[in-house]
């Protein structure tokens, strides 16, 4: 089983370096998209100090909650398909993720589940209704000009509610997922055939949390999807972002059946990361 890790990074090169050290496997390659806003020189040493590391030559200037996050994701998937065609899975990560079980166990698990994809979803028009405005309203996240919010408000007043392309049932939740080769190639071909999806999603908010999920869920591959993204995430704070994991979270992580967790901070989570390194 050959695994392609794909990391979306934008800062903290030393935190990324620590993650790269833990991800090493004989049959794995690590692909990194570095946000165009980040200085590449701070990260160049990672290709020397770690094996099987490839920085994507093309980079996207990512806007938080914008389509540009997906643009970088699809750019990486396309690069992996072309330059590592023997891969079986793409495992999407950020530098704030970290394994909580040995990666050899993760690899073994995927070997027993070839052809499946692991991602988390809820039904938007059901149990994730706070996401409805993301789809039905126009959002100018990727158009950060002065006065864009006023124009956005006017557009939403004048125009009717938007609907998901092709009548697809909207599902989604977390952008972090593990996709099989078949589903990655299906996604890329689908987007080539139906460019309406890119046009629609460029005017939504946070489409990285529902675009891929929705396309795959409404495809002939639905039965190959597992509603579990294999990550431990603590949303108990009730905020927009998950809780930063600390030392007192260690028992929960060790008791979890997940293979990765997020999010970790290089300073606040240092004690926890040190303990994980001794155990995992």
Image (spheres, rainbow, N blue to C red):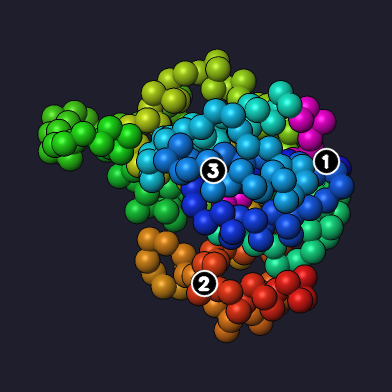
Q: Nearer the viewer, mark 1 or mark 2?
A: 2
Q: Which residues are magenta?
A: 84-95
Q: CA distance from mark 1 to mark 2?
A: 33 Å
Q: Is residue 60 above or below residue 7?
A: above
Q: Is residue 93 magenta?
A: yes
Q: Nearer the viewer, mark 2 or mark 3?
A: 3
Count neighbours of disc 3 (C-alpha within 10 A) and say few if under 14, some if 14 to 19, many if 20 or more.
few
Count neighbours of disc 1 (C-alpha within 10 A) and say few if under 14, some if 14 to 19, many if 20 or more.
some
Residue under the point 46% across and 37% down: 36
Q: Secondary structure at mark 2?
A: loop
Q: Is residue 162 above or below residue 113?
A: above
Q: Secondary structure at mark 1?
A: loop
The residue where tag 1 is placed is 2
Q: Nearer the viewer, residue 266 or 213?
A: 266
> Where residue 204 appears, x then y in whole percent?
35, 37
Asked whether, in this view, residue 199 is left or right of residue 87, the answer is: left
Query: CB atoms at circles 1 and 2 under 8 Å apart?
Result: no
Sequence order check: which comes first, mark 1 or mark 2? 1
Residue under the point 35% across and 53% down: 130
Q: Which mark is residue 267?
A: 2
The residue where tag 3 is placed is 41
Residue under the point 66% across and 48% down: 46
Q: Considering the image in quadrants, where does the C terminus appear?
A: bottom right
Sequence order check: which comes first, mark 2 or mark 3? 3
Q: Nearer the viewer, residue 254 or 247?
A: 247
> Where residue 170 appears, x then y in whole percent?
46, 40
Q: CA distance from mark 1 to mark 3?
A: 29 Å
Sequence order check: which comes first, mark 1 or mark 3? 1
């Amino acid at each position: 089983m050959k695994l392609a890790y794909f990391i979306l990074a934008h800062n903290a090169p030393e935190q990324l370096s620590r993650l790269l050290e833990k991800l090493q496997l004989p049959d794995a390659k690590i692909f990194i998209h570095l946000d165009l806003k980040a200085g590449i020189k701070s990260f160049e040493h990672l290709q020397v100090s770690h094996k099987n590391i490839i920085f994507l030559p093309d980079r996207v200037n990512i806007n938080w909650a914008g389509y540009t996050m997906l643009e970088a994701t699809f750019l990486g998937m396309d690069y992996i398909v072309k330059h590592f065609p023997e891969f079986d899975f793409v495992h999407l990560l950020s530098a704030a993720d970290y394994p909580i079980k040995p990666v050899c166990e993760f690899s073994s698990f995927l070997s027993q589940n070839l052809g499946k994809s692991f991602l988390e979803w809820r039904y938007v028009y059901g149990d994730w209704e706070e996401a409805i405005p993301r789809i039905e309203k126009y959002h100018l996240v990727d158009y950060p000009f002065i006065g864009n919010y006023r124009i956005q408000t006017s557009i939403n007043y004048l125009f009717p509610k938007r609907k998901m392309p092709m009548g697809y049932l909207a599902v989604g939740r977390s952008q972090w997922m593990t996709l099989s080769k078949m589903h990655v190639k299906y996604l890329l071909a689908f987007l080539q055939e139906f460019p309406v999806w890119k046009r629609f999603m460029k005017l939504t908010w946070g489409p990285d949390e529902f675009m891929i999920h929705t396309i795959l869920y409404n495809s002939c591959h639905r039965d190959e999807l597992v509603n579990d993204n294999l990550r431990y995430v603590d949303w108990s704070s009730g905020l927009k972002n998950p809780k930063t994991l600390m030392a007192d979270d260690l028992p929960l992580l060790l008791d979890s059946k997940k293979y990765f967790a997020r999010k970790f901070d290089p300073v606040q989570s240092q004690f926890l990361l040190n303990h994980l390194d001794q155990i995992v």
